[in-house]
Image: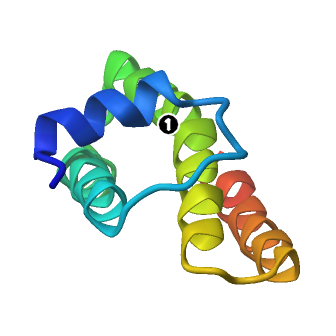
Amino acid sequence: MKTFINSIKDLFTRTYDFQGVSSRAEFWWAMLFYQIIAIPLSLILEYHISLYKIEWAILYFIFYTAIPLTSLTIRRIRAIGKFDGETVLTLFGCVPYLFGVV
């Protein structure tokens, strides 16, 4: 069973691995990591604590984790046996989020 640290390491070391599969634990540990970082950053923006360095840190975090999370999602969908049409729909669902944040 994957631990939190191992899942985060795999998230970034398997960034461009779109062909493999990922376990359920690996997927949810990575999502927990993303939320632990994303929620405080979004609260900073919500309460208008506008510092130039913080805004750039948020953009770097979003773009740095976009491809690893997309590849992890594709691997997880492949692991549960869904067809590739649902993978494409999942990717198209992520695109408005990425452009809406920027």
* Residue 29 image position (x, y, % from top left): 23, 56
Indicate left or right for 68 with 43 as reference.
right
Asked which quadrant contains residue 77, the reply is bottom right
Residue at x 54% of width, y 38% of height: 68
Q: Nearer the viewer, residue 11 or 19?
A: 19
Asked which quadrant contains residue 86, the reply is bottom right
* SS for callout 1: helix
* Residue 24 image position (x, y, % from top left): 34, 68
* Residue 10 image position (x, y, % from top left): 37, 33
Indicate left or right for 98 with 65 as reference.
right
Indicate left or right for 20 with 64 as reference.
right
Q: Residue lying furthest top in this view? A: 53
Note whether 80 is above or below 44 in the view shown: below
Q: Nearer the viewer, residue 101 or 37?
A: 37
Residue at image mark 1: 65
Q: Amino acid at mark 1?
A: Thr
Indicate left or right for 77 with 29 as reference.
right
* Residue 98 image position (x, y, % from top left): 67, 53
Note whether 6 is above or below 100 in the view shown: above
Residue at x 68% of width, y 60% of height: 100
Image quadrant holding the C terminus, namely top right
Answer few, some or many: residues within 10 Å of disc 1's Cα (few below 14, many 20 plus, some between 14 and 19): some
Number of numbered discs overlaid on the protein picture: 1
